[in-house]
Image: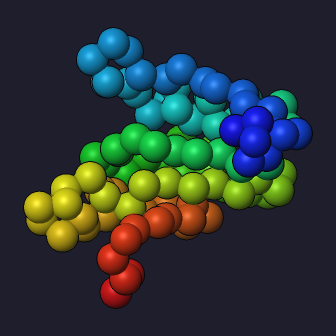
Amino acid sequence: MVGLAPNVKIQPRKVLDATGTGYTDLVSLAIIDAADSGAQIINLSLQILADSAILHNAVIYAANKGCVEVAAAGNYGDQGNPPSTRGLLRGVHRWSHRPLR
């Protein structure tokens, strides 16, 4: 990152265990903590299988504080990379190598 964006400060948050499993309440707390710590961009590179009101509220909270939140659009390239979460979360930007429909 130094050559690309020398003034960037990375603020990592660990929300998954060694097996890659975690809880939406911990993800939500990390989003709120990042927003409160002055993060401008929050990268959510993880898969969430169910809707979560607490996560949705954390995303809205961070967006209202001016954070841009980015999430992976899908993890199943062999299946056309469908979004991993039904409807995704309002306020989270998603990226995919395929056009969104």
Please determine whether, in this image, residue 37 is positioned above or below residue 61: above
Residue 35 at least partly seen: no
Which residue, as the protein is rendered here, is positioned at the far bottom?
A: 101
Relative to 95, 99 lies left or right: left
Instruction: Report the residue at 41% width, 22% height from top.
Output: 16
Compare residues 45 and 60 and report the one nearer the observer: 45
Snapshot colouring: rainbow
Q: Quadrant of the C terminus?
A: bottom left
Task: Look at the picture and state if 44 lies above or below 22.
Answer: below
Is residue 63 among the parts visible in the rendering? yes
Q: Residue at x 37, y 71 (%)?
A: 97
Residue 89, x across and y down, in percent: 49, 61
Question: Residue pushed farthest front?
Answer: 3
Q: Residue at x 57, y 56 (%)?
A: 70
Residue 66 lies in what quarter of the image?
bottom right
Where residue 28 appears, as percent x and y from the top left, is 57, 35
Which residue in the rendered view is the most extreme toward the left? 78
Look at 71% across and 57% down and name the residue there.
Answer: 68
Tag count: 0
Out of 63 and 13, give the one closest to the viewer: 13
- State the image coordinates of residue 4 (x, y, percent, origin top left): 73, 47
Image quarter hosting the N terminus: top right
Q: Quadrant of residue 77?
A: bottom left
Q: Is residue 17 above or below residue 72?
A: above
Q: Position of residue 43 (x, y in %)?
A: 58, 45
Give the residue furthest to the top.
Answer: 18
